[in-house]
Image (cartoon, rainbow, N blue to C red):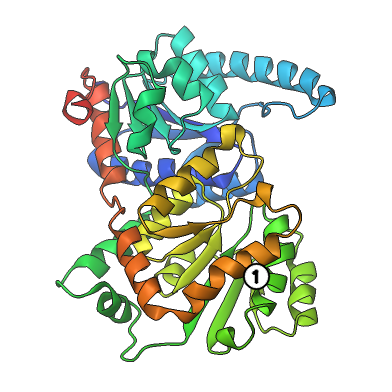
């Protein structure tokens, strides 16, 4: 291992791609304080903010997602070609020793550049159905760190794979460890964690916030109106995402419901650890954080996710009795009614929520970030992480 290794985390397209990398980087800061850690992404403001707040440098690599129409095809080709060339130059000029692909379209360009430069790389695969980049390059990777056991059949038979779980933001890991100490029941541990001596008002959290939040913002108020008196003693917190706050507030007002609506929840970990039910999408990081918090959810997979990855994730959690699934793409414009059907039994049945809370917490992997950081150190030391891949 070099005296001061340079590790580059590459990903992007949504801030959720960076949270696992930031979690791993925090462990590396402790175990490899001499290392230089850089993040590369497409330049979205929220990604930059998340990385820089964690104390790391962020560099922009031009890249575009798979085009949805012919008009986007030319920009897809030109921007990704330019991003690949820029990544090759950066890897050489900055003396990068190891690349960690976090997922997203920037990750593809940077990992391919690492292959061309013969720089070792690890892949973090957040989804149960692996991305095309993970499938194409898994055999050449030093290690594929996967969030789900279900990835194995989709990868090359000789690909080195470790089922580490998905790293979550460090505060989730910290709160999970505090909650798990003392041998108390999950319910008692949550009360202790939040400093409450008596059961609090029940809380439902709706997590929009990325590009796919609009349909949730439109449907949730109408769905909750259909629950009527069942919600009388519940607090509703709704994260709308940028540019949709006022419209969502108006929808709740028109439905005669009180809800705390915010653009983004900054202290999301403390909110979820003190919540009883969540409605959200089903990205890998989101599910990992729900598991750490021990909070069940109604999952509404983003219908335009590549290869239906979010639906595949949701099915893993629903098969474990941890969540309920609403397939938005099959609702024919009646998403609010489908949501109301799934929410009603969860809102009225405390025993059911308690059982699902235990089931989802059983899926938590609080050591994921530490295990991946250890694999990075082994790879820098010349190993191929045989311990984890075994």
Q: Is residue 55 visible?
A: no
Examine the rendering and report whether any part of residue 278 can be seen.
yes
State whether residue 54 is above or below residue 358.
above
Q: Quadrant of the C terminus?
A: top left
Q: Position of residue 150 (x, y in %)?
A: 37, 35
Q: Nearer the viewer, residue 94 or 46?
A: 46
Query: Residue shown at 74%/67% (left/top)?
Result: 245
Whether 219 is drawn above or below 301: the answer is: below
Q: Residue at x 37, y 64 (%)?
A: 293
Q: Is residue 275 left or right of residue 179?
A: right
Q: Residue 229's quadrant in the figure?
A: bottom right
Q: Residue at x 75, y 30 (%)?
A: 68
Q: How dense is the environment of label 1, judged by Cα within 10 Å: few (below 14), some, or many (20 and up)?
A: some
Residue 127 position (above or below residue 298):
above
* For residue 120, above or below residue 278: above
Which quadrant holds the N terminus?
top left
Q: Which residue is mark 1?
A: 262
Picture coordinates of residue 9, whole percent (x, y)? 45, 32
Across and down, in percent, residue 314 comes to 48, 48
Query: Horizontally, is 135 left or right of 15 in the view?
Result: left
Please name whichever residue, 296 or 268, is drawn nearer the observer in this view of the structure.
Answer: 296
- Horizontal side of 100 relative to 43 (left or right) equals left
**Residue sitting nearer the eye, 84 or 73:** 73
Tell me where residue 218 sits by quadrant.
bottom right
């Amino acid at each position: 291992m070099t005296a001061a290794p340079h590790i580059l985390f590459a990903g992007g397209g949504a801030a959720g791609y960076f949270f696992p990398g930031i979690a791993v980087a925090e462990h590396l800061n402790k175990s490899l304080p001499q290392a230089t850690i850089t993040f590369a992404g497409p330049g979205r403001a929220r990604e930059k903010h998340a990385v820089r707040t964690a104390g790391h440098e962020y560099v922009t690599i031009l890249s575009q997602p798979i085009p949805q129409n012919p008009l986007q095809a030319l920009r897809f080709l030109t921007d990704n070609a330019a991003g690949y060339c820029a990544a090759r130059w950066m890897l050489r000029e900055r003396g990068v020793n190891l690349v960690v692909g976090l997922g997203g379209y920037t990750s593809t360009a940077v990992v391919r550049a690492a292959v061309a430069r013969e720089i070792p790389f690890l892949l973090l695969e957040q989804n149960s159905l692996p991305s095309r980049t993970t499938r194409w390059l898994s055999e050449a990777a030093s290690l594929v760190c996967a969030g789900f056991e279900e990835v194995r059949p989709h990868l090359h038979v000789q690909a080195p794979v470790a089922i580490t779980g998905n790293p979550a933001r460090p505060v989730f890991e910290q709160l999970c460890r505090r909650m798990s100490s003392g041998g108390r029941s999950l319910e008692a541990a949550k009360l202790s964690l939040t400093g409450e001596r008596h059961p609090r008002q029940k809380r439902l959290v709706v997590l929009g916030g990325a590009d796919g939040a609009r349909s949730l913002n439109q449907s949730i108020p109408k769905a909750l109106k259909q629950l009527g008196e069942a919600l009388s003693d519940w607090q509703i917190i709704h994260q709308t995402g940028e540019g949709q706050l006022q419209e969502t507030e108006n929808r709740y007002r028109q439905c005669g419901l009180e809800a705390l609506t915010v653009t983004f929840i900054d202290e999301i970990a403390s909110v979820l650890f003190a919540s009883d039910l969540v409605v959200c999408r089903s990205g890998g990081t989101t599910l990992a954080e729900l598991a750490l918090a021990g909070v069940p959810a109604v999952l509404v997979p983003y219908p335009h996710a590549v290869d239906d990855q979010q639906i595949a994730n949701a099915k893993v959690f629903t098969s474990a009795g941890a969540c309920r699934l609403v397939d938005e793409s099959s609702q024919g414009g009646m998403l609010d009614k489908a949501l109301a059907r799934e929410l009603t039994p969860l809102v009225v049945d405390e025993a059911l929520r308690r059982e699902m809370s235990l089931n989802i917490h059983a899926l938590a992997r609080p050591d994921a970030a530490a295990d991946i950081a250890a694999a990075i150190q082994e790879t820098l030391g010349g190993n191929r992480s045989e311990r984890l891949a075994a």
